[in-house]
Image: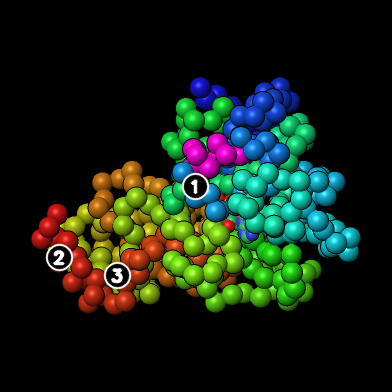
Amino acid sequence: MTRIIKISENRIGKKRIRYAANQIKDGKLVVFPTETVYGIGANAFNEKACREIFKVKNRAADNPLIVHICRFDQLKEVAVVPDKLFKVIDRLWPGPVTFIFKSRNLPKVVTAGLDTVAVRMPSNKIALELIKESNVPIAAPSANISTFPSATEARHAVADFFGKVAVIIDGGRSKFGLESTVIDLSKKPYRLLRPGSYDVSRLEKVLGKIIIPDSINKTVRKGKVLSPGMKYRHYSPKKPLFLFDNINELISASRFLESKNVKFATFIPCEYKAKVNGNKKLILGSRDKPDEIARNLFSSFRKLDEIDAEIGLIADMKLDSFDLAVRNRIVKAAGENKVKNVKQFIKFIDSYVTYR
Ligand code: AMP
Ligand code: MG
């Protein structure tokens, strides 16, 4: 049975946190809010509980978990960290950035057998209190069934995990709405493994030069990957999402789809509302407020599956902040459905219309 517990970050009810923490201590799973997205957590030292996370998420066993901590002494329990790095990390935590170190003491299931571990100290007060009360590091990937968009509201996690976890804590909408930035500090030069809510150029001011691999915004299918999670289909709605190079291509495509009576939805910044055809426009926010677009992205992807539409359309966009992370999520969510040009798209749709 799953208990859904509402907790406000401004006034954290001790009794409620204690209930959830007792479930963690008891080897159960708890969905909890963080400032990035919701996490599905277990005691990081409990192998069986961590195995259960993989099972309920349908997560590939070679995709390691992020270990969440609330104090620096917990970092030493799970990772080997050079002394001089502590001061540096202290300037960045708590916050939406995950670091990779050499791992220690953790069951293999958490690190997927790697000799490194991903660790983060979140800034969300509910997450911090939960870890504190549990008195153990909490291993937690994003609270979504694998390949689907991460949960940015408790109701998303309820849809995916009700009946499969002990507790779902409803702490309201996620502040950032995109996962943490992942940086490998286990070897030099430091390297970006996943763009996320913490801007890389801000991290560079503290950490020095960070390498951004070319593969970051590609759909990697095979071969060696730096971070196992990056090779999987990710963040995708169940319905096909088509990615266009720019908004003008999307606008032409929307005109064509309307003429063919295909039911489609568009994901667009509000500035283009008047230009795009169709009556299902999922407004991501304003281009001038990239944080809004980041926050709304996953919940609007989930909306595509709820509304009466067959397909979704989105266009690449250049943003002043969150640019790398937002574009990464869009590229991965669309996967193979990257449209080379409108002509090619029209061909695809023509064949689809014949067969549906
Ligand atoms: P999620 O928590 O679902 O956002 O996924 C955690 C992300 O961290 C995935 O992309 C993992 O591949 C990555 N990750 C976790 N542990 C490691 C590690 N030891 N080395 C590289 N990447 C990692
Ligand atoms: Mg995830």
Location of mark 2 (residue): 351
Q: Amino acid at mark 3?
A: Ile
Quick check: marks 3 and 1 in contact, CB under 8 Å?
no
Residue 92's spot in the image, x, y percent?
A: 77, 59
Q: Amino acid at mark 1?
A: Arg
| Res. 59 mark | 1
Residue 73's spot in the image, x, y percent?
A: 85, 46
Q: Is mark 3 within 8 Å of ligand 2?
A: no
Q: Amino acid at mark 2?
A: Ser
Query: For the residues marked 3 and 1, what is the alpha-carbon distance in whole angstroms?
Result: 36 Å
**Which one is in front, 169 or 228?**
228
Check disc 2: other Cα within 10 Å, few if <14, some if 14-19, many if 20+: few
Question: For this view, does 224 lie left or right of residue 7?
Answer: left
| Helix, strand or loop under label 2 | helix
Q: Could you tell me which residue is drawn at 74 percent across and 54 percent down?
A: 103
Residue 272 at least partly seen: no
Location of mark 3 (residue): 251
**Which one is in front, 322 or 121?**
121
Magenta-tinted stretch: 49-57
Residue 109 in which image quadrant:
top right
Q: In what quadrant of the picture does the C terminus appear?
A: bottom left
| Helix, strand or loop under label 1 | loop
Q: Could you tell me which residue is drawn at 49 percent across and 38 percent down?
A: 56
